[in-house]
Image (spheres, rainbow, N blue to C red):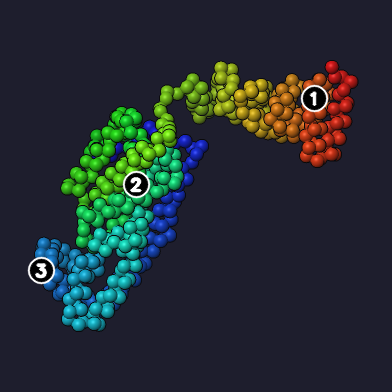
Amino acid sequence: MLIIPIQNKPDWRRPPLVCFALVLINLLVFVLYQSGDEARWQAAEEFYFASELPALEEARFYEYVDAEQPEWRTLAQGAGEEFIYEQLLWSREFHRWLVVQLEEEGQSQWLQQRQQFAERRDSLSSFAYGLTPANPTLKGLFGHMFLHGGWDHLLGNMIFLMLFGLSVELALGAAWFVGLYLLGGLAAAALHMGVEAGSLMPVIGASGAVSAVMGMFVAVYGIRRLRFFYTLGFAFGEFTAPALLVLPLWLGKEVFGYFFGSDNIAYWAHFGGLVAGFACTWLLIRLRPSREIQVEEDLPPTPEQLALARIESLQNSGKLLEASQAAAAARRQHPESLPLIYKGIELTVLAPESEAHHRAWLALFALAKQPGQDFAPVARGVEDYLQKAKVPRALNAGVCLVIAQRAAAEKRWELVETLLLRLQQKEHRHPLMARLANGLVDHYRRCGDEARARRALEFARSLQPAAV
């Protein structure tokens, strides 16, 4: 069973850097550190078979089976040497039992070889930094969260971390997110150690911490209704429900997996992470009620979005003329839409001297008349247009004056100077030009650029006789 949200959208204007950093750390650990495990294991295996251990330990393995694991005798008889040597090399339970026997018997040389082999084997990442319930260490408690058993294990955890972590980090803040992530991972480890007390099998993976992020997600969205995608066997689909409703479903899935699922999955670690993430985040939200959690809802496409989609469909089909005409029509209906304006420029760029291309740029320059409209795209557009157009017809005298006046209000004095020079070249005169030129004089004097201030003053004086 799989249940994931398909509605929440992070605000990319505030990128969730901690979430990205966690993904990057896990990737780097796997690629740069765990990639050496094969060489480490090969060294341990070569040492083992080059020593006297294989001949000495096979008989002792049967003693161990009779004393500690009688159910293994059937497996040993069925699988033969492959099963036996797998346990001789990997089983830490057998290693612990054998070391006690050798110490009691005074087998110092044998014991020394066994310890040397164990040192090489334990240099593997899962033994060195994995979480061993029977022998927990500080490096294992934290290190196991950043280790994985393979690419499928790593990518699965990282995908779920991104699915849930992006929204959670933006809601709680980076510091709280990383703190609760680590705390949830520790809580997951604690529950696993409680259930599997005495086990010498190391556990690795970010699953417990990622499960905590899933619990945090439920606490953040609470009773808000979200859309979820689910799979159950071969069935799949969508449903809408309060976020809080999926927590018992996730918890039930882990309990079911413990009794009926694979033995290689730490289900109780997932369970502990879910509960810890939810409980800690719920408490945090109650203690910090002033923090508003923003949830973006799925909304139907706007007329502007529909128009843009139709234009792009025509463009992708190779119908560039129809797309250009559709863009011009949509621009008339939505004159302040930057995406439609840019699309119009893009569609006519192959004919830079066409009337349609200049009209597309003119639509951008017209935004300077709107006080609430961001002026930065207009300013960049003027620079680009002057560089690319051989004859920039869209920047006629009236348009230049409008943009220059807005540029002066925005303190973009270099653009004001550019536009005034263009008006001067066209021998255009207008009372507003003198005021703009005087503004240039004041600006350059404040900057200490007397040469440019004098040129602007001369230009302003040249306009005085025509000024009203």
- Residue ID at (25%, 68%): 89
- Residue ID at (80%, 41%): 448
Viewer-nearest residue: 94 or 329: 94
Q: Is residue 21 above or below residue 135?
A: above
Circle 1 crowding by C-alpha within 10 Å: few under 14, some 14–19, many from 20: some
Mark 3 or mark 2, which is nearer the start of the sequence?
3
Residue identifier under label 1: 435
Q: Amino acid at mark 3?
A: Asp
Q: Amino acid at mark 1?
A: Arg
Question: If the image is split into quadrants, where does the N terminus sit?
Answer: top left
Mark 3 or mark 1, which is nearer the start of the sequence?
3
Question: If the image is split into quadrants, where does the C terminus sit?
Answer: top right
Residue identifier under label 2: 210
Viewer-nearest residue: 234 or 199: 199
- Residue ID at (66%, 21%): 369
Task: Tell me the SS state at disc 1.
Answer: helix
Q: Amino acid at mark 2?
A: Val
Q: Is residue 305 visible?
A: yes
Q: Are marks 2 and 3 in contact (CB under 8 Å)?
A: no
Circle 2 crowding by C-alpha within 10 Å: few under 14, some 14–19, many from 20: many
Residue identifier under label 3: 66
